[in-house]
C-alpha cells in the first residue's frame, strides 16, 4: 500500500492533466480493511474518497482533492467446472481485454464480443459494459464489493447489481462501492457464440474460412471484433480519447418522424414506448462537426462520437467542457436534440458531476 501526491495525467486515457492529493494502491482486500479503519479514525483531516481503475471512462479535474483508491488486486481462480460451463472469479485489477483473451484461449466462452474494451475488470460492472449485442450481465454471476460508508463487505448477485443499459447500482450510487472481485459463469460449448451483430458475422466467417474451418469458433468472433474495433476507434495510446463521448439520445417517435421529413437519412432505432434512439454520431456529422470541436478537443475524423485530445497531458477538463458545449449547442440548434455525455465527470472533491457544466 502506498500513499503520495500523484500525477494522474497518464492514468486516464483522455490524457487530461490531473494531480491527485493522495493515491492508495490496493493489492489485496485486507489492505482496504486496514486503510478504512485508519481513515474512519481520522475523520477530521480526511479528504473524500474516489475509486479509479484504468481511467478509460472518466474526465478528471486538474486538481483532484481526494484520496484516490486504486484497486489492483490480481488473480483469476477456477471455482467450478462441468462439461457445460466453468465458474471463475476474477480480481478487480485484472486487465479486461487480457481476461477476454485468456478465457477464449482456455475454451471458456461468453466474453469474446467484449474484446478490446479498455479498463480493468473491477470497473466493468459499473456501467455494465456492452458491445456487439453482449452486455457484462449476460455472464456475470456475482460481485464482491466493499460498501465504503458502512465499511462492510457484500456479496451482490446479478439481481442485486440492478443492471440496466450502461447502468448499475454502482453507477447510481457513486463513491459508495469498491468492487474487488467479479464472478462469471462461462460456457465450454463453442456453439454459444454470438456473431449475428452488424458486420461481425461476415468478418468472423471470413476468418474461419481462412483457417480452413467450416464452422466459426469463438476465437474467430473475438478476432473479428478486435479488427473491427481497431478500424473504427482510435487507440487511446496513439490519440487520447475515452471511447464514445455522447450517448445516443432517445426522442419521441413524433419528433423523429418530423425530423425525417427534413432529414430523410436520419439514423434511428425503434425503442419501447413510442421512442426512437438516434445515432449521436450522425447528428454531430450532420452538424458539420466530424473532425470539428474546439482545439485541442475535437471529434475523430472517422468516428464523430469520439472526442480526442490533441495536447495530451496539457489539456484540462475545462477544455473538454468547452468542446462539449460547442458540439452540443451545434446539434441542438440544428435538430433541437440535447446530447448527454457518457464518461464520468469527476469534480475536484471526487464527487461525480452531471451536465451542469454544459450550457
Ligand atoms: C477506446 C475506448 C473504447 C470503449 N469502448 C467501450 C465499449 O465498447 N463498451 C463500453 O461499455 N464501454 C466502452 N468504453 C468505456 C470504458 O472502457 C469502460 O467503461 C470500462 O469498463 C472502464 O474501465 P476503467 O477501468 O477504465 O474504469 P475507470 O475509468 O477508472 O472508472 C470508471 C468509473 O467506475 C468507477 N470504478 C472504477 N473501478 C471501480 C471499482 N473497482 N469499484 C467501484 N467503482 C469503480 C470509477 O469511480 C468511475 O466512476 C470504451 C473506452 C475507450 C477509451
Image (tube, helix red, strand yellow):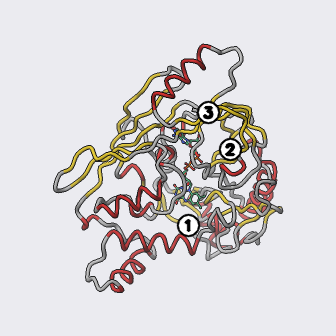
**What is the secondary structure assignment of the residue under circle 2?**
strand
Could you say which is closer to the camera, residue 173 or residue 28? 28
Q: What residue did someone put label 2 on?
A: 345
Give the spatial CA distance, label 2 vs label 1. 27 Å
Give the label on residue 2, or none.
3
Mark-to-mark CA distance, 2 and 3: 26 Å
User: Is residue 333 at all visible to an observer of this figure?
Assistant: no
Task: Check the image and report above or below for 121 versus 207.
Answer: above
- Nearest the camera: 328 or 21? 21
Residue drawn at x 42%, y 26% is 153
Q: Nearer the viewer, mark 3 or mark 1?
A: 3
Rendering quarter of residue 247: bottom right
Q: Quadrant of the N terminus?
A: top right
Binning the other alpha carbons within 10 Å of mark 2 as few (below 14), some (14 to 19) or many (20 upward) gives many
Residue 24, by quadrant, is: top right
Residue beneath the point at 54% across and 37% down: 172
Which residue sits furthest front?
2
Of marks 3 and 1, which one's residue comes earlier in the chain?
3
Percent position of residue 237, x then y? 65, 63
Where is mark 1, residue-wise? 268
CA gap between label 3 and label 1 equals: 49 Å
Q: Which is nearer the eye, 33 or 231?
A: 33
The spot of residue 17 in percent (x, y) is: 77, 49
Q: Earlier in the sequence, mark 2 or mark 1?
A: 1
Viewer-nearest of labels 2 and 1? 2
Q: Are marks 3 and 1 in contact (CB under 8 Å)?
A: no
Q: Farthest residue in the left direction?
A: 83
| Side of 231 where 8 appears, left or right | right
Amino acid at each position: 500500500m502506498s500513499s503520495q501526491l500523484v500525477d494522474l495525467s497518464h492514468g486516464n486515457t483522455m490524457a487530461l492533466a490531473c494531480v491527485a492529493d493522495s493515491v492508495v494502491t490496493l493489492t489485496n482486500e485486507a489492505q482496504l480493511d486496514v486503510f478504512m479503519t485508519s481513515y474512519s479514525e481520522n475523520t477530521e483531516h480526511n479528504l473524500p474518497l474516489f475509486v479509479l481503475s484504468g481511467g478509460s471512462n472518466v474526465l478528471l479535474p486538474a486538481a483532484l482533492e481526494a484520496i484516490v483508491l486504486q484497486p489492483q488486486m490480481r488473480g483469476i481462480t477456477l471455482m467450478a467446472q462441468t462439461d457445460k460451463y466453468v465458474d471463475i472469479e476474477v480480481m478487480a485489477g485484472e486487465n479486461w481485454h487480457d481476461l477476454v483473451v485468456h478465457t477464449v484461449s482456455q475454451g471458456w466462452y461468453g466474453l469474446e464480443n467484449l474484446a478490446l474494451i479498455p479498463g480493468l475488470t473491477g470497473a466493468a460492472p459499473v456501467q455494465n459494459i456492452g458491445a456487439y449485442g453482449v452486455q457484462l450481465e449476460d455472464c456475470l454471476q456475482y460481485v464482491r464489493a466493499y460498501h465504503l460508508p458502512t465499511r462492510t463487505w457484500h456479496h451482490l448477485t446479478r439481481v442485486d447489481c440492478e443492471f440496466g443499459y450502461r447502468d448499475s447500482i454502482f453507477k447510481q450510487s457513486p463513491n459508495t462501492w469498491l468492487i474487488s472481485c467479479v464472478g462469471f459463469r462461462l460456457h465450454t460449448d463453442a456453439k454459444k457464440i454470438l456473431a449475428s451483430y452488424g458486420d461481425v458475422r461476415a468478418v468472423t466467417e471470413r476468418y474461419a474460412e481462412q483457417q480452413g474451418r467450416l464452422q466459426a469458433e469463438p476465437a474467430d468472433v473475438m478476432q473479428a471484433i478486435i479488427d473491427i474495433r481497431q478500424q473504427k476507434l482510435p487507440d487511446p495510446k496513439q490519440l487520447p480519447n475515452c471511447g464514445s463521448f455522447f450517448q445516443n439520445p432517445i426522442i419521441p417517435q413524433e419528433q423523429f418522424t418530423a425530423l425525417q421529413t427534413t432529414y430523410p437519412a436520419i439514423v434511428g432505432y425503434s425503442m419501447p414506448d413510442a421512442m426512437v434512439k438516434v445515432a449521436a454520431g450522425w447528428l454531430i456529422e450532420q452538424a458539420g462537426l466530424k473532425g470539428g470541436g474546439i482545439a485541442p478537443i475535437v471529434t475523430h475524423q472517422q468516428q464523430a462520437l469520439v472526442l480526442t485530445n490533441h495536447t495530451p497531458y496539457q489539456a484540462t477538463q475545462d477544455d473538454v467542457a468547452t468542446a462539449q458545449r460547442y458540439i452540443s449547442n451545434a446539434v441542438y440548434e440544428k435538430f433541437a436534440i440535447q446530447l448527454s455525455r457518457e464518461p464520468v465527470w469527476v469534480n475536484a472533491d471526487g464527487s461525480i458531476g452531471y451536465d451542469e457544466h454544459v450550457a
